[in-house]
Image (tube, rainbow, N blue to C red):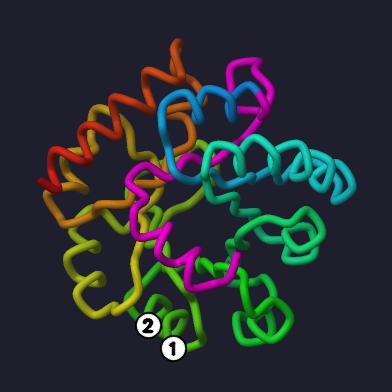
């Protein structure tokens, strides 16, 4: 699949589930994936900070066939080499990861996502070739302990209008506060524990997606 097709698929994304096995109530990333597929999500990001690259690659390979069969995009967090080796659709890069321009030279057909924590970082990421930009953290989040600077939902309406590429938002978003980010204009919502810690993960995916689609209609 080429980059243009992947960008078109990304534009149809509403909920953007992200894995984190230690925050999955004892369930494996593959169990989370199966629930995310059942809930109808169009993308999943394999994010596993606490395992070696070999294990991450094995998980990425295990994710590839079911995501492809479901017509889903598979994004790998941080590691471009793993994304390429596993045949994933993209990689999500943080501020201290491989620079976007270098990643684009290596992987011209992959989706490149970039984390941003300010308007300046978001605009730099877009200028450097990001296909989408994440804005966050919006609220306190279990995935990033000790974060002192939270952007709040008001950052969405301050940053998003300056972007030409699609954007996601992330950081502590759940069923209780999603209306705040939707009211600020977000339509692609990245979540971890709102899905991974839900008693019924597939139902949580379906419910959150419905909330996003209702706001967009």
Which residue is drawn at the image coordinates 69% and 23% (left, top)?
28
Residue labelled with disc 2: 123
Disc tally is 2
Task: Kindly state the secondary structure of the residue where label 2 is placed.
Answer: helix
- Gap between marks 2 and 1 measured at Cα: 6 Å
Q: In this view, does 191 lie above or below 117?
A: above
The reply to whether callout 2 and callout 1 are in contact (CB within 8 Å) is yes
Q: Where is residue 6 in the image (x, y as percent from the top left)?
A: 50, 63
Which residue is drawn at the image coordinates 62% and 35% (left, top)?
20
Residue labelled with disc 1: 127
Q: Residues within 10 Å of mark 2 (few under 14, many from 20)?
A: some
Which residue is drawn at the image coordinates 37% and 82% (left, top)?
123
* Residue 4 highlighted magenta (yes or no): yes
Chain part drawn in magenta:
1-30
Q: In this view, does 90 lie to the left or right of 125?
A: right
Q: In this view, does 96 lie above or below 194?
A: below
Which residue is drawn at the image coordinates 59% and 16% (left, top)?
25
State which quadrant residue 120 falls in. bottom left
Task: Kindly state the secondary structure of the residue where label 1 is placed.
Answer: helix
Single out the mark in the foreground, 2 or 1. 1
The one of 110 and 134 positioned closer to us in this rendering: 110
* Residue 13 highlighted magenta (yes or no): yes
């Amino acid at each position: 699949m080429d980059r243009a097709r992947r960008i078109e698929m990304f534009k149809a994304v509403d909920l953007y589930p992200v894995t984190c096995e230690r925050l999955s109530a004892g369930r494996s990333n593959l169990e989370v994936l199966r629930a995310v597929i059942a809930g109808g999500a169009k993308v999943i990001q394999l994010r596993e900070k606490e395992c070696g690259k070999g294990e991450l690659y094995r998980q990425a390979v295990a994710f590839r066939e079911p995501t492809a069969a479901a017509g889903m995009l598979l994004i790998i967090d941080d590691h471009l080499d793993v994304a390429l080796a596993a045949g994933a659709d993209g990689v999500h890069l943080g501020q201290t990861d491989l620079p976007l321009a270098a990643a684009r030279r290596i992987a011209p057909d992959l989706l490149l996502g970039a984390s941003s924590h300010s308007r300046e970082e978001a605009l730099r990421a877009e200028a450097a070739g990001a296909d989408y930009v994440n804005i966050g953290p919006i609220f306190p989040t279990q995935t990033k302990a000790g974060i002192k600077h939270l952007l709040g939902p008001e950052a969405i309406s301050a940053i998003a209008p300056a972007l030409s590429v699609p954007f996601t938002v992330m950081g502590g978003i759940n069923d209780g506060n999603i209306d705040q980010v939707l009211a600020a204009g977000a339509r692609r919502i990245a979540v971890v524990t709102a899905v991974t810690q839900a008693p019924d993960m597939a139902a949580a995916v379906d419910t959150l997606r419905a909330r996003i689609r209702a706001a967009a209609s």
